[in-house]
Image (tube, grey):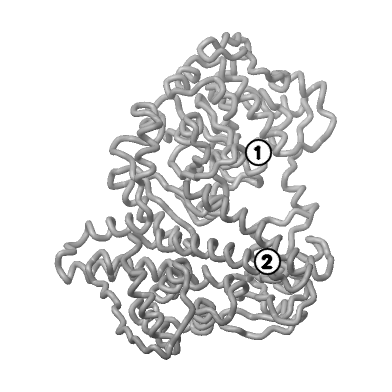
Amino acid sequence: MAIPQQTIDQILDRTDLVDLIGQRVKLKKTGRTYSGCCPFHQEKSPSFHVYRDKQYYHCFGCQANGNAIKFLMDIDNRNFIEVMKDLAGQAGIELPKDNQDSKKLTYKKSLPQQAKADQAPSSEAPPPNHDNPIPFYADFDLPNDFGFDASFADPQFYTDEIAHQEGNLYDLLENIALFYQQQLPKSQTAQRYFKQRGLNATTIQNWRLGYAPEDWQHLEHAFPADIDGLKQLGLIRTSDTGRDFDLLRDRVIFPIRDSKGRVVGFGGRALNDEIKPKYINSPDSEVFHKNQLLYGLYEGTKNKAQDWFLVEGYMDVIALQQAGISGAVATLGTASNTEHLNLLFKRNHRITIAFDGDAAGQKAAKRTLEIALPLLNDGRELKFFILPNEHDPDSLIRQEGIEKFQQLWQQAPLLSDFLFALLTQQHDVSTPEGKSQVMGELRNLTQLLPQQGSYRYLLSQAFREKLGLGKRFTPQISHDASLSFNIRTRDEDFVIGLLVYYPYLYPQFEKLRAYIHTDELLAEVLTTLDQIFEQLPEDQERAIYYALGACYNFRDTLADILQRTEILYTFETPEKTFSAAKEHALSLEEKHLKLKMKNPQSLQESVNLRMQLNELTKKISLKLVSST
C-alpha cells in the first residue's frame, strides 16, 4: 500500500504523542517536556523526553527517538502499514486502497483498427510529415537518432505489439518523452534555439530535451492506441467543434520528472516569441501535480546538491546546472508555495530565492516572504538574491560568467537584512514616527513566524538595535565574596551570557542537561530556563529581567559574566546569533560527552556514549560543510 506523504502528515497532526506514549510510559511534565523512564532500555532515572509541540520523543540514554509511527513500530515490533492503519483509525482518516490507486494510473487502450477509425484526418490541420529525413545533428555532435529506438513512433508497432487492453500512464509518458527527443534533430529551429541558449550536447541529453512537431495531431498518429491515456494526461484537447488536437505544438520540450526520476509531465516553450503563452505546461493529472513538484529537484538530488536555489524558469535551472550549480530548481509555471519551500528545506536548512530587480520582482519577493515566514523554524535560513536589472540567472551567466554570478550570490542578504531594507525604504527612519511604522509592520510580519522558536524574538531585537531603539542592559555588579563558583571556561561563560540575553535560544542547549554535572552554573541556568521557558515575555528586555529574576540565587556571578562577554552587540543578524548558538551547543556537547566517557557507570553506558559521540561528530561535520 502506497500512502501519500500528505496523508501521513495529516495523521501525525491529529495524533497527540504525549497521550499515545502516556498509555505505555508513566510521564511527568518537567518544564516544556514530558519525561519518564525509557521503555527501550533499563534505567532508574528518567532520560526519556517527549516534546508535544514537536510531536517527537528522544532518550538521552539509548538514543531512541522518532515520532508516533516510529514509537509504535519499535515498541510493538509491528510494520509500517499495520501502525498506519491503527493511527489512521484513531485519527478518523481513511487510508487509500491499493486497487483504487493503481486503477487511477491505467487507461484503456484502443485496438489499432478502432484507433484508426476514431482518428480520421482533421480538416483543422495538415497531416504530419513522417517522410522528413532526420538530419545529422552536427552542431551538437550527436548521433541522428539520439541512441533511441524509434519503433514506438511507427503506427505499425501497435498493430504487431498490442497484447493488453490497459496501459500505464507512467509508461506512456516515458514513451512520449522518447518521441519528443526523437523529433529534436528534425527541427533546425529547435536545435538553433538550444544552441543560442548555450546548451551543449551532454546537457541536452541529460535533461532529455526535445521538440513537439507543428502537426496538430502528431501524438495521435504516433500513439494511436493510447488516445485515452493522452487525454487523461491532458496532452490531447478537444476543440469546440469536437476535433481532437495536441496541446504542445512547434515547441521545445522540457520533460518534468518526479522525485523518483519518472517523467510525469512536460513543459513546452514556443519557438516564435509572438505566440502566447510563451510557456505551456501539462495540466494536472493523476501523476502530475504542479504544486508538489519542482523542476530540477530530481536532478539536483541525484547530483547530491548541497546548496539549493529557487529560480523562475526551466532554462535558468539547466544553465546553472551546466555551469556547476546543481541545486537550482524552478516552479512549474506557478507561484512558489509552502510545499515547494518545504521540499527544499528538507534538503538543507539554508535556501536562496532569486528575484528580478524590477517592481514585479520586489512584489513577488514580498509575497514569497509572507509564505516563507511560517516555515522558518529555528535553524532555517532564507536568502534573497535580487538579480541585476534585465537579467535572469541564465543571461547573467552567459553574459558575465559563473564567477560573477557566484560573487553576487554570496553577497545575497539574509532574510533579516532583506526585510529591514524592504521596510525601511518605505519610511523615514530618521524620525520617531518612521521607526514606529517600521516596527509596526515588522510586528505584523513576525506574527507569521512559528510561535515555538527563537527567530521571531531575535528578529525583533535585531530591528530595535538597527533603529537605535535597543537599550543595553548593564546589571549592577556585586562583589559579595560569600558567593563563590568554580572558574568557568570561556565556552561555558559565553553560552551562559547568550542564554541570559537571548533566553529563547534555550532549546538549542537543552540537550546539554544530560551531560553537564548538576552543580555547574550552566546546568543551573539550563534547569531554570527549562522551568520558565513557556512563560518568557516576547519583549527582549522583559525576557532578560524575567530570566535574571528566575536565576536570582546566582545573579552576581551572572552579572559579571554578562559584563565580560558583552553578548548583546556581538552579532549583526538573528541568523548569525542562532548559528553561533548552534555551534557552541555542539562544541559543548562534544566536550562534555568526552568528559563523561572517561568515567562511565557501566559497560552499556560506555557503548551508548560512544554511539552518541559518533552521531555528534557527523552533525559537526555536516555543520562545517553547510557553512562553507
Badge 2: residue crowd in 10 Å (few <14, some 14–19, many ≥20): some
Residue plotted at (49% across, 20% down): 190
Residue plotted at (20% across, 62% down): 427
**Viewer-side residue, 5 vs 172:** 5
Left or right: 280, with 85 as reference point: left
Q: Is residue 69 above or below residue 179?
A: below
Q: Is residue 59 above or below residue 417?
A: below
Residue 574, by quadrant, is bottom left
- Reading the image, the residue beneath label 2 is 597
Residue lying at the far left in this picture: please name it: 431
- Name the mark on residue 88: none
Mark 2: which secondary structure? helix
Residue 88 visible in the displayed image: no
Residue 110 pos. (x, y %): 76, 32
Q: Is residue 316 above or below residue 2?
A: above
Badge 1: residue crowd in 10 Å (few <14, some 14–19, many ≥20): few
Residue 331 visible in the displayed image: yes
Between marks 1 and 2, how big is the CA–CA gap? 45 Å
Residue 46 pos. (x, y %): 70, 80
- What number of labels is visible? 2
Identity, as a three-letter code, of the amino acid under mark 1 = Gly
Residue 42, by quadrant, is bottom right
Identity, as a three-letter code, of the amino acid under mark 2 = Met
- Reading the image, the residue beneath label 1 is 261
Residue plotted at (42% across, 82% down): 547
**Viewer-side residue, 250 vs 555:** 555
- Mark sitting earlier along the chain (1/2): 1
